[in-house]
Amino acid sequence: MKPNVNIPRTLEAYDNFIIKRFRENQTGYVYTNLVNLYVVMVPMLQKEIMRYTTDELTELLEAIPQQVAQREFTNFIDYCKKRYVSKSKERIKLGTTKGKGNEAYTFEQWLEFARLLFSPNQELLKKAITNRTNAMVWLYSALHYVCGWRTDDLIKLPFPPLENVLGLNEEEVFECIQTGEFTLEMAQRVVNYVMLEVKAFHIKPRKTRRKHNQRLKFVVNDDYVYIIGLLIALCEAHRVKVEKSKHRWLNSSTILTERVTKRETHIEFFGEAYNHIFGNETFSNNSATKTYFNWNQKLSQDEGWGMGYEINAILRGHYRGKDGIAQTTQVYLKYINKSNDVDKITEGLLARGVFGFSKHLLMKALLHEDEYREYTVLQLTQQNQAIQEMFNLKPFHIEQMVKGITEYRGRVLEVFQQLMTTHKGQMKEIFKKISMGEAPSKMEHSQCLLKTVSRSACAYPTREHCIGCEYAMNEMYFLIEFGQRFKQLLNNLRNAKHDFDKQRYTYALFYVYLPIFQEAVSYFGKERVGTFVKVAKQEINELRENNQLLFGEGENNVS
């Protein structure tokens, strides 16, 4: 097949592109696609491909009949842009063409793919450990369930320094995952690192960062933490391994590469289950992000609840069929219609990771005593023992912390006693807003009971945070900022020179911070909380020995 015009640079580029593609994948499947693309594309060209505008390239793309050949065309355009001066500056994607690629997935597809991604699967795990592309495809697909990022942004996902975050090198990470020793706490540390990187560096969407000041958000629901954290660690181990190999043609600059968008890599990893879900189509970032946003918006409008909670409920087995997880929209809607508001509030609080005495009182107000016993027996002695082991506190300091807990819970109880006088229907609406995250406090990942009544209300308007506020309903990721402020409080205590400063910081430690820390440990366990709040055991011990802990008048400042 000869071109109609003289295009030597384009033909040279295509020859080199073919060589590159065969280095990546030597299957006959790729060969057929490249031939099909050449046969269709070359006769249509009226000038060098580098001189085409974005609109002209889009027209060429739409003229190519086979979708797989369209995919190779976009790969070829990207290849040319990296090596030649090109008139088109925007990336050409399959999503720019009209057709099925822009449609959101059905709920059946979305849930079925979630089963494949998040259910324990040793076969997939083994394939992901032995092959980088497999691991990347798995992570790329799973990320669509926790964030609505474009592909360009997902590829640039911050990667964690394994030895700093996990204390393991890449080979030790492979072994840890292979032997089943990779824990939830390890996954949480990885997720926390990525979350902090995204937030600290104000990462913006690559496509719109010059036009808008909107920032990307990365928050991983508790149900997804283990798989997402494990896969990020696994992909980073693969990336480091490639980086150390110094192969020039292998990309080690990003944790994911563009190969994660290719249908053949999806088929190779997921197998026939993938075709069962998507048919002849390829899992599309555009369709996935539409599903992620549209279903949440639609169900929030129609039912008053976000879809995310319901997926979590079904995946956790709240409603299972004979073959495992309910798969049809009919069953899904039946599940929603059967669930009452209390069920949904409970599910919402669980999904958001709400913890503490406030949550206990809230649930107690909604459920019968015999249905909810989280704080029936407070077991303070057992709970305080965990804190004592973590910080090496003396009995006197444990006593001060118990006073702080009692004082804090007393203030919270007063708030809920006021709520109990409210009409029961109104009270349910208040709790519903909390469970849906519609009453944000001053701090990220924390809700405010006052905000459910008035968006401008605040019990402590001069404070810059909500730590210790009796109206605050804290969630799991609240512990990230809490841990940073806790560390700063200990630094302030360490550097305090005057008794007044020592007293106020000591009061904050025992009457504000340690009560919340104790509640978190009671709910999540000390290992999980330790992934958020990094405080060395000897730190409070050193403060005590250096006489930096000072209580007010009338208190026995025993060391």
Image: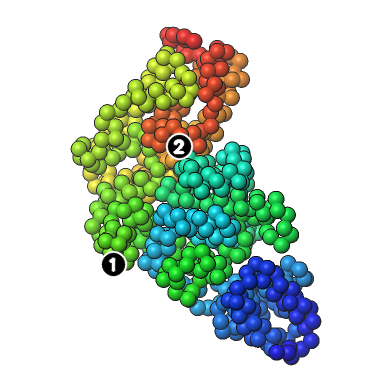
Position of 447 with respect to 152 (left or right) is: left
Local SS, label 2: helix
- Front residue (pair 136, 244): 244
Q: Toward which corner of the image does residue 16 lie, by quadrant?
A: bottom right
Residue at position x 21%, y 36% in the image: 369
Residue at position x 52%, y 20% in the image: 540
| Colouring | rainbow
Q: Position of residue 260 (x, y in %)?
A: 57, 63
Instruction: Look at the image and tell me in which quarter the N terminus lies.
Output: bottom right
Q: Position of residue 251 (x, y in %)?
A: 68, 59
Position of 47 with respect to 507 (left or right) is: right
Task: From the image, tell me which residue sits under label 1.
Answer: 330
- Front residue (pair 431, 240): 240
Residue at position x 79%, y 82% in the image: 8
Position of 403 with respect to 548 (left or right) is: left
Q: Eyeballing the image, is 333 above or below 125?
A: below
Q: Is any atom of residue 440 visible in this view?
A: yes
Q: Which mark is residue 142?
A: none
Q: Is any atom of residue 407 visible in this view?
A: no
Which comes before the other along the chain, label 1 or label 2?
Answer: 1
Local SS, label 1: helix
Q: Are marks 1 and 2 in contact (CB under 8 Å)?
A: no
Task: From the image, tell me which residue sits under label 2.
Answer: 528
Q: Toward which corner of the image does residue 81 lie, by quadrant?
A: bottom right
Q: Which amino acid does the dot numbered 2 rest on?
A: Arg
Q: Position of residue 17 (x, y in %)?
A: 71, 73
Q: Eyeballing the image, is 386 above or below 429?
A: above
- Front residue (pair 512, 269): 269
Q: Which amino acid does the dot numbered 1 rest on?
A: Gln
Q: Residues within 10 Å of mark 2 (few under 14, many from 20)?
A: some
